[in-house]
Amino acid sequence: MTIAVLGAGAFGTALAISLAQRGPVLLWARDAAHVAEMQESRRNTRRLPGAVLPECLTVTAEITDAAGCEVVLLGVPMQKMGRFLSENAALLDGKVLVSCSKGIDLATGRGSVELIEAACPGARAAVLTGPSFAADIARGLPTALTLACRTDSPGLQARLSTPTLRLYRTTDTIGAELGGALKNVIAIAAGVVIGANLGDSARAALMTRGFAEMNRLAMKLGARPETLMGLSGFGDLVLTCTSLQSRNFRYGIALGSGADFDPGVTVEGAATAKAVTRLAQGHGIDMPIAAMIAALCAREISVSDAVTALLSRPLKEE
Ligand SMILES: NC(=O)c1ccc[n+]([C@@H]2O[C@H](COP(=O)([O-])OP(=O)(O)OC[C@H]3O[C@@H](n4cnc5c(N)ncnc54)[C@H](O)[C@@H]3O)[C@@H](O)[C@H]2O)c1
Ligand SMILES: O=P(O)(O)OC[C@H](O)CO
C-alpha cells in the first residue's frame, strides 16, 4: 500500500526518498510549479538539492491522490499544521497521521498530536522525531528516530523503518513531541553563545541547563523521563546544538553575531520559544533560557543583556 508524504520540504522529501526503498510513495507539494520541476528533473532543488527522487516515488500537486493511502506523513512546518489539518480534515480523518514536524503551535499551545486529534478525531496520530538532518536521510546515512503513538504500534514501526532509518517506538507522545520542540529553542541559544564568541564551555553549560529546563516542562506536562533521555530529547539536543547543518543553530549564530538571516528559512524554535514561554508561565515552571530566546527573537532584548540576566540569577543547587 502506498505511503503518502504531505509537504515537499527538505524533511518530507528525504523521508519519501528513504521510504521508497521499501515500496511506492506519494509526495504531495502545494505548489504546482514546484511539482512540475520535481517531475521533470527528478530532484527537489528548492529544498533538498543533490538528492535524486527514486522511480517509485510519485510527485503530485493533487492532495486527493492521497485518498487511498492509509498511512500519511505530515511534513508541513508546525505553525502551518493546524490550518493545514482543518482544511484537509475530510481527506485525512480515519487515517494514520504521522507528524514529522517539531514545535508547539503558537496559536493554541498544542503539539501536533493534539492538533491532529482536534481536527481529525477518527485518525490515529503518531509522531516521528529525533536526531536527523534531511540531507543525511536522503543520502542513506544511518539514522535512528523515535516513533511515538498513544497505542503501542509495532506494525507502524516496521512499516516506516528502512535499511538505513531505524525507528524506536514509544507510547509517550508528549515526551517525544516536547523533546523535538524544545531542543530547537535550546539550539538557538547554543547558536547565540557561539555567534557571540562566548566559547564552547558556555555552550556546554547552556545545553546542560537547557536540558534541565526541557525536563522540567516535559515532566510537568506528563512526559516520561526516559523519553527525554532518548533520541527525541538528549539525542536531538546534542545534534542540533553542535552542527552547522541545523537551521536553528545557524539562526542563533546570526542573532549572537548580529548578522542577517534569510527569513525564508524554516526556524521552528523561534515561534516555539514564545509558545513554550507562555506554557511555562501558565504551569508555573521556570524556563529562563527559553524566555531569553523568545525575547531575543522578538528583538526585545540585546544579546549582552540576555547573557547578563542569565548569569546574574540567584545561585542555587544544581
Ligand atoms: N530539514 C530537516 O533536516 C528536518 C529534520 C527533522 C525534522 N524536521 C521538521 O520537519 C518540518 C518541516 O521542515 P522542513 O525542513 O521540511 O522545512 P522546509 O523549509 O524545507 O520546507 C517546508 C515546506 O513546507 C511547505 N509548506 C509550508 N506551508 C505549507 C502549507 N500550508 N501547506 C503545504 N505545504 C506547506 C513549503 O512549501 C515547503 O516546501 C519542521 O517542523 C522541521 O522541524 C526537519
Ligand atoms: O535544521 P533544524 O535546526 O530544523 O534541525 C533539523 C532536525 O530537527 C535535527 O534533528
Image: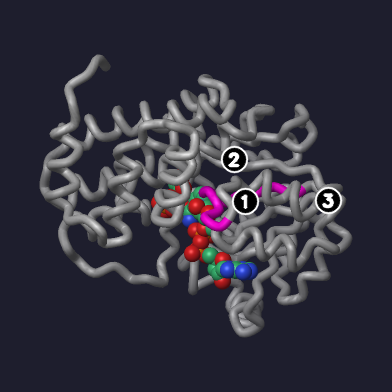
Which-is-in-front pick, marks 3 and 2?
A: 3
Q: CA distance from mark 3 to mark 2?
A: 23 Å
- Rendered location of residue 31, percent (x, y): 63, 79
Question: Given the image, on which type of amino acid does mark 2 rest?
Answer: Leu
Q: CA distance from mark 2 to mark 1?
A: 7 Å
| Residue 45 in the image: above or below residue 160 | below
- Rendered location of residue 111, percent (x, y): 60, 45
Q: Residue tagged by mark 1?
A: 18
Can you say which quadrant of the picture contains the C terminus? top left
Q: Which residues are magenta?
A: 97-107
Question: Given the image, on which type of amino acid does mark 1 rest?
Answer: Ser
The one nearer the camera, 90 or 69, is: 90
User: Does 200 sit left or right of 125 as displayed?
Assistant: left
First along the sequence among labels 3 and 1: 1
SS at mark 2? strand
| Residue 225 in the image: above or below residue 64 | above
The verdict on residue 138 being magenta is no
Q: Residue tagged by mark 3?
A: 95
The one nearer the camera, 227 or 79, is: 79
Residue 134 shows up from this direction: no
Question: Given the image, on which type of amino acid does mark 3 rest?
Answer: Lys
Q: Residue tagged by mark 2?
A: 165
First along the sequence among labels 2 and 1: 1
Residue closest to the far top: 317
The verdict on residue 106 being magenta is yes
Asked whether mark 1 and ligand 1 are closer than 8 Å, the reply comes as: no
- Among the 4 quarters of the image, the one containing residue 264: bottom left
